Amino acid sequence: MAHRGRPRTFDPDVALRRALDLFWERGYEGTSLSDLAQAMGIASASIYACFGSKEDLFRRVMALYGATSGEPPRRALRDGGTARSAVHAMLRATADQVTGPETPHYCMLVLAAPVGAVENHAVREFLADRRRDQYATIRERLARGVADGDLTASPADLDALARYYTTVVQGLSVQARDGATRADLEAVVTCAMAAWDALAGC
């Protein structure tokens, strides 16, 4: 008769949320495995057994982040009635998220691991891929606006527009990290949308 392993004495979902909070507070390189073990309330061996390496855990954390804090801007972009209203709603939702009272004031996708040790290149590239996906998602929404007839833009225009508004989204995070308030970011959003007519040609 096969022996069953010892049952877990912790809730993996709770532990993952605690890991998210710590990575969000300290960034990838500023968070050690011992820090994670303490924050998650489990032994390092249990982290490896349940989540894999620190990098594996971080990837799981980023999936959770995307499904929670990262979802409102994507939903706003997806659900906006026109391309313009969708982009506007996305920017405002981003400003809300990066200045929330209960979380650090930055987007993990942008600032969790911007530079650092050579051995962490895979993590930085992982985040870069996620940011490239952010650009692609914005471009797809703009292309939908062209198909719906509420935006007039060539493929090159769509590339530039998507790049511009991706840059604004990511810049909001940097500004919030450096102390900009929600009102400060709303002023940035207002300027970005004032540029829409000139940039979008409609």
Image (cartoon, rainbow, N blue to C red):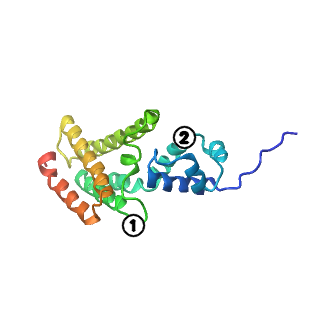
As measured in the structure, the alpha-carbon distance from the residue carrying label 1 to the one carrying label 2 is 28 Å
In depth, the one of 172 and 178 nearer the eye is: 178
Residue 101, numbered label: 1
Residue 81 showing in the rendered view: no
Q: Are the residues flagged by discs 1 and 2 in contact, CB closer than 8 Å?
A: no
Residue 120 shown left or right of residue 98 in the figure: right
Percent across and percent down for residue 2 are 84, 39
The one of 132 and 9 positioned closer to us in this rendering: 9
Q: Residue at x 41, y 53 (%)?
A: 70
In which quadrant is the N terminus drawn?
top right
Secondary-structure class at tag 2: helix
Q: Position of residue 166 (x, y in %)?
A: 28, 46
Question: Image point 46% across, 36% down: which residue?
Answer: 120
Residue neighbourhood size for the residue with mark 2, other residues' Cα within 10 Å, grouped as few (<14), some (14–19), many (≥20): few
Which of disc 2 and disc 1 is earlier in sequence?
2
Q: Amino acid at mark 2?
A: Asp
Residue at 39% over, 37% down = 129
Report the front residue among 177 and 137: 177
Q: Amino acid at mark 1?
A: Pro
Residue 178 is situated, as x and y percent measured from the top left of the image, at: 30, 56
Please give left or right for residue 85 compared with residue 100 in the image. left
Q: Counting other residues with Cα less than 10 Å from the Cα at mark 1, is it few (<14), some (14-19), or many (20 or more)?
A: few
Q: How many marks?
A: 2
SS at mark 1 in the image: loop
**Residue sitting at the far right:** 1
Mark on residue 188? none
Q: Which quarter of the figure has residue 128? A: top left
Whether residue 177 is visible to the viewer of this picture, yes or no, is yes
Disc 2 target residue: 56
- Establish if 44 lies above or below 176: above
